[in-house]
Image (tube, grey):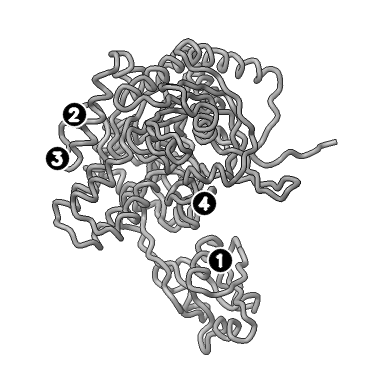
Amino acid sequence: MRTLNGLTIAVPRGALFAETVDLLEGLGLDTVELRSNDRKLLFEHIGVITMRPSDVPTYVESGAADIGITGKDVLLEQAAQGSGDPARRVVYELLDLGYGRCTMVLASKAGPDPAAEALRRLGVMRVATKYPRIAARYLEETGRQAEIVEVKGSVELAPLTGMVEAIVDLTATGTTLREHDLIVREEIVECTARLIANPVAHKLRAGPIDDLLGRLRAA
Amino acid sequence: MIHPIPSGTRDVLPDETREVRAITDALRKVFEGHGYGEVYTPALEYESVLARAGHTARGAGSADAQPAYRVFDETGAVLVLRSDMTVPIARVVATRYPTVPPPLRFCYLAHCYRGVRPQRGQPRELLQAGIELIGAPAPQGTAEALRVLCAALDAVGLEGYRIGLGDASLFPSLMASLGVPADARAGLLGALAQRDFVELEQALSEIELSAQARQLLLEVPQRRGGPEVLDASATAVADAAANMRQVHDLLDTDVASRVIFDLGLVRSIGYYTGAVFEVYDPALGAPIGGGGRYDELLGRYGRSLPAVGFALGVERLHIALAGEERGEPGQAHAGAP
């Protein structure tokens, strides 16, 4: 079989890519071109679409892909307010794939915590993040007033320039944080790669999807 | 000049209107042909009246279906734009048909309003086409609704569709019979309603249960497929499985062959009590419509009668029809049964 049980799968480029491709190869997919051609996006002969991780739920929800792999951080950010949130992506979350493990943390500059001081004296802390919804929800749930500053690039810059007192970001080893003299103050949630499925494909293509799940669980 | 319209709404121009009209005419003819009389009700209702349905009191997943737009009238009363037609029709039955002997059959083609994230096939002002069958208990009433549903979809020319059939009481009774502590049940049901089996597994691992019970609670809601799904089911879900089988046995082959049994089907609306169903088509990534039994809703309006109904999203139906015409990629996987 050239595709994965005839399924179209959304594959994340970036940090999860290498392990995802290994996983697909282990399931019997011919991944030679997928590994060698990083400009190509659509690999129709093996039923693979590649994209940035945060786009995976979008393609899977619409049905352009039957299943997909992305980080829990992405899923949380796109559903940070829970099931009642109209902005959530409607997909099935089928399996924790275990790899790509990292932690969403609240970090600030080493030394006396500037975020705590801002909260105490000014009543509100400013927090830079690429995950505004996760950050806002976490700070709300822990009873702290915060101004969320959404940035698209290197989050570490924000506290170093004094624009914010803290950041909420994903860290795997903590190296980047240490290099910028930032320390982890709180761990918010552990994130790993997840297998997701389109709700209609989950019903109409139950056999292929369950077979895949069985093979992944057994692996 | 460009003058904006609210997010999630759109203008429908003549070419599209002609196509939509062909769909709605076909649907109306099928509904009327099965004895369902068309009703209109006000788009605006008193919030306090719709709230009787208990929309707001329900938990996970119900937010989509709650009224999202509120206005005040000149006396200060709070009005809402209806989010579905089932609740207004329950009100109509209790107030306008307090003594007429059941069953009562109504159909509608009406705009409803929801605070959803606007996207293709999911407007905030959505045109729904559906029926309500009041006073016809399970399983006969449910089977009639499914027959009308398939006749309607056949009449508009949809080919590859399937009906997912589940039971709203299945997972709650499974939790009760396996001894899940009462305070843990909402969390498990919430994970299922969010379609998050990773979270369900995680939540189950934190509850004191036998390994076998844990396995059943994770596995049963993932079972979906042909009648073999019911055969394989644990005794703990025997009642729900028997209900589904009874409905299935009442269906003609052409309707029965469209059915996928889905032991994990959870609808986002809180008032469903028994059979629930959804319509899928390979040409669209989201359900085209759905429905189910709501045997307790009418009682909240003062005329306690069992009832069942469904609603189709006309825009989604239109997109799926257009997709089938084009032979979109999704369609190659799963044709008509």
Of labels 3 and 2, the one closer to you: 3
State the SS at label 4.
loop
Of labels 2 and 1, the one closer to you: 2
Quarter in which the C terminus of chain B is drawn: top left
Measured in 3D between alpha carbons, the distance from the residue under mark 1 to the one under mark 3, in whole angstroms, is 50 Å
* Label 1: chain letter: A
x, y percent for residue B5: 73, 38
State the SS at label 2.
helix
Residue B92 can be seen in this image: yes
Measured in 3D between alpha carbons, the distance from the residue under mark 2 to the one under mark 4, in whole angstroms, is 36 Å
* Label 2: chain letter: B
State the SS at label 1.
strand
Q: Residues within 10 Å of mark 2 (few under 14, many from 20)?
A: few
Residue A37 can be seen in this image: no
Q: Residue at x 59, y 63 (%)?
A: A153
Residue under disc 2 on the same chain as residue under disc 1: no
Q: How many marks?
A: 4
List the residue tagged with mark 2.
Answer: B228
List the residue tagged with mark 1.
Answer: A129
List the residue tagged with mark 3.
Answer: B235
Amino acid of disc 3? Thr
List the residue tagged with mark 4.
Answer: A85
Residue under disc 1 on the same chain as residue under disc 3: no
Measured in 3D between alpha carbons, the distance from the residue under mark 3 to the one under mark 4, in whole angstroms, is 36 Å
